[in-house]
Image (cartoon, grey):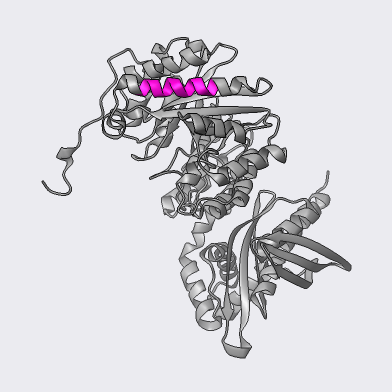
Amino acid sequence: MASFDHRKYRPAPRVPAFDRQWPDRQLDRAPTWLSEDLRDGNQALLEPMSVEQKKALWRVILKVGVKEVMVGFPSASQPDYDFVRWLIEEDQIPEDVTIAVLVQCREHLIERTFEALAGVERAIIHLYNSTSTVQRERVFEMDREGITQIAVDGATWVKEQAARHPDVDWRFQYSPESFSSTEIDFSIAICEAVMDVWQPTPDNKVILNLPNTVEAAGPHHHADQIEYFCRHIKNRESVIVSVHTHNDRGGAVAAAELALLAGAERVEGTLLGNGERTGNMDIVTLAMNLYSQGIDPELDLSNPDEIIQVVDECTGIALHPRHPWVGEMVYTAFSGSHQDAIRKSLRKQGDDEPWQVAYLPIDPRDIGRDYQAVIRVNSQSGKGGMAFLLERDYGISLPRWLALELAPHVQQASERVTGELSSAQIRDLLRETFVIEAPLRLKGYRLDRDEAEQLSITLYEGEKTLSLEGAGNGVISAFMDAWQRHSGQVVSVVDYGEHALGEGSDASAIAFVQLNIDGQRVSGMAEDGDTVSASLKAVLSAINRVRAGAAETVARREATPA
């Protein structure tokens, strides 16, 4: 048999025939979201997150608005245990947020889990065991009765431990792990056996989570499984049906979306889709899918740059530029016909009518992107030559994102002079556009390196002197911290680049930065004798550009007759 031979595979078994109804339904509300970033996402990393990284990601998850968060597997991991203790002891869990913890059906692990949760006000205990045919026969070598007994024993131990802490608002969750590859009748039977132990009611529902642990069939097949389960599980009014889809076939989002049509009420996933193998269901993508259909996702995704930055820093996984909805290039059109259709649609789009713009399923401004990403491609033809001249004559290697932003300015200047711009003119235009040295100027700084970068920086603001302090994992990160404390602005780094200019004793440094300031993207640039000073001055240029833009807006309004 050849190594690449489809004949060794069989299609996934179908559920029994029934009068499916999900294809005729339409979604009209958001599900309950649970973030798996700190558990399922974390275990999939080559280097699992530190407690400090978990804290940073926890804050972003809360800021987005997720109300249920799987915070770890405290009985199996000391960092997870320590993180859970930090959440509880430092009072880090908001009143409207519920944490969840995962545990296997083993008595000593369940005891350890409840130890980790000492002092919590409310929590979800997520119990699971493997149920699929291949797991039963080839891993555990047990029949259905043996696997069911494991689940029943685990449910009993969880119930006994919870009874010892009646002051806590406990919620119970059970997953027949590998539900997607488990016979549907057995999935229902084992879930009902667990329900017999926990005795849920309509006022105290059990969460039955049905994982598409390994995506073995299309999303329509998963929807059939979910609807069949929902229609056959007993005491349906006492059950919250949850789904947890993986992306082995590239259909995790579709499978979750169709599962909601099929009756699921709760969705587990990660921000931007990190997870084992090809990843978990991407909460951002599914939420934006709902948003684009006029459904409130009940999450705040208005500033995806911050999400992207923190997820990148915590996981080490960069976002693909074509990632749905929030990738760097998803609102950029290169085709001339696409550009023309977008431009004409935008001209006719009214502020008080539903969004109808060709090739743009949503208004990019809703998520902090502006139309520059759309219209800047009109100047693409000049970008390559412009960048070539700057590098050849001045050693300035522009980052691609800055070259794209500069290109329209070069195009406009070229049209004004009705001729070709020299490399010196392009360099001057680059500085005029991105180097703004007032009102904020750098006076001096001190940088101490301990566990984190500790920055003390002094600035001139006009005639006034500012002294700021900040900390971070780099000089720019530390300055972001200092500036946010001083100004109250929400600032994150979208992109950054720097390199040396010249060689030897005459060498200097040039730095480029793109920030997101309160949802607005802005770039800055600076040159200096050393990299740190150049970086700080580039950030100050970006902030000055925002201030200059705001001042121009105010001046225009004041000059406009009432």
Above or below, 399 against 220 in this view is: below
Residue occupying the far left of the picture: 1
Q: Residue at x 83, y 51 (%)?
A: 558
In the rendered image, residue 156 lying in the magenta stretch gets the answer yes
Residue 278, image quadrant: top left
Question: Which of 354 and 341 lies nearest the eye of the viewer?
Answer: 354
Main SS category, magenta section: helix
Left or right of 336? Residue 460 is: right
Q: Position of residue 438 (x, y in %)?
A: 78, 68
Residue 178, image quadrant: top left
Left or right of 409? Residue 173 is: left
Q: Residue at x 47, y 12 (%)?
A: 196
Residue occupying the far bottom of the picture: 505
Above or below, 488 against 507 in this view is: above
Magenta region, residue range: 147-159
Residue 62, image quadrant: top right
Q: Position of residue 444 (x, y in %)?
A: 78, 73
Q: Is residue 208 visible?
A: no
Q: Position of residue 426 (x, y in %)?
A: 58, 75
Q: Position of residue 30 (x, y in %)?
A: 55, 27
Q: Residue at x 60, y 12 (%)?
A: 203
Above or below, 297 against 421 in this view is: above
Left or right of 392? Residue 540 is: right
Question: Which of 84 and 257 lies nearest the eye of the viewer?
Answer: 84
In the rendered image, residue 129 lying in the magenta stretch gets the answer no
- Say how many tags the image has: 0
Q: Residue at x 56, y 33 (%)?
A: 113
Q: Is residue 98 visible?
A: yes
